[in-house]
Image (cartoon, rainbow, N blue to C red):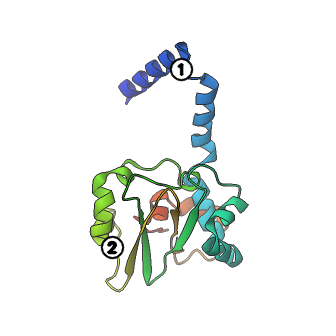
Amino acid sequence: MRAVDARVRALESILVEKGYVDPAALDEIIETYQHRVGPRNGAHVVARAWTDPAYAERLAADATAAVAELGYGGRGGEHLAAVFNSAREHHLVVCTLCSCYPWPVLGLPPVWYKSPAYRSRAVLEPRAVLAEFGTVLDDDVAVRVHDSTSELRYLVVPQRPAGTDDWPADALAAIVSRDSMIGTRLVSV
C-alpha cells in the first residue's frame, strides 16, 4: 500500500505544480469524504428510524426529506428511497448499469458493489450472493432486489436486532454497517 500512497502523492504534486488541481479543493474533497459523508450518516438515519416511529414513517414516505432532516444530502442523495427489512422480506440494492449509490449516507461505494459480477449476480441469484456475504435467509423470506439509478437510490433499513430495545440511538448506530444498508449483511449484536 505504501507504493500506491507514494504514487498518489507524486501524481498530486505534479497536478498541483502544473496548476491542474487546487490543493485547497483537494483538501475540501478529502474533508468531505472523511467527515461529512459516509456510512455513519446512514447508521444515524437507521438508528433514528428504529427509535422514532414517526421518523420511520417519514423515511418510508419520503427518504430524501427525512434524511435531510438530519442534515444529510448532496450529490448522490438527491432522490432516495428507504426500504425496510422485516422477518418476511429482505432487500438488496444493486446498480446494474454502473454504480449509482447514495454517497451522503453510505460514503464511498465498496469495490465489489461496482464489479460486473455483483451487478449481474445480485439480480440473477440474490440468495447466492447474500450467502457469499454470510447472509443466509430462511426460504420463507422474500428477497427483493432494488436497482439504483441516477434518478433513485436506495437505503436499506435493516431489521433491528432482538435485545436492543433499551439501547440509545448512538449505540444502535454503532452496530449498523454500510453492508447492512446495502442489504448484503444483517445487523447483529
* Secondary element at image label 1: loop
Residue ID at (59%, 35%): 29
Residue 20 badge: 1
Residue 75 badge: none
* Secondary element at image label 2: loop
Task: Give the residue number, with chain letter if any, for mark 2.
Answer: 136
Q: For the view shown, which residue lies furthest in the bottom direction?
A: 140
The image shows residue 109, relative to residue 153, as above or below, that is above
Q: Amino acid at mark 2?
A: Val
Residue ID at (57%, 35%): 30
Quarter of the rendering containing residue 95: bottom left
Give the distance between the C-alpha atoms of the residues marked 1 and 2, in whole angstroms: 49 Å
Q: Is residue 160 left or right of residue 64?
A: left
The image shows residue 56, relative to residue 120, as above or below, that is below
Q: Is residue 46 left or right of residue 156?
A: right
Q: Amino acid at mark 1?
A: Tyr
Residue 155 place in picture, x, y as percent: 53, 64
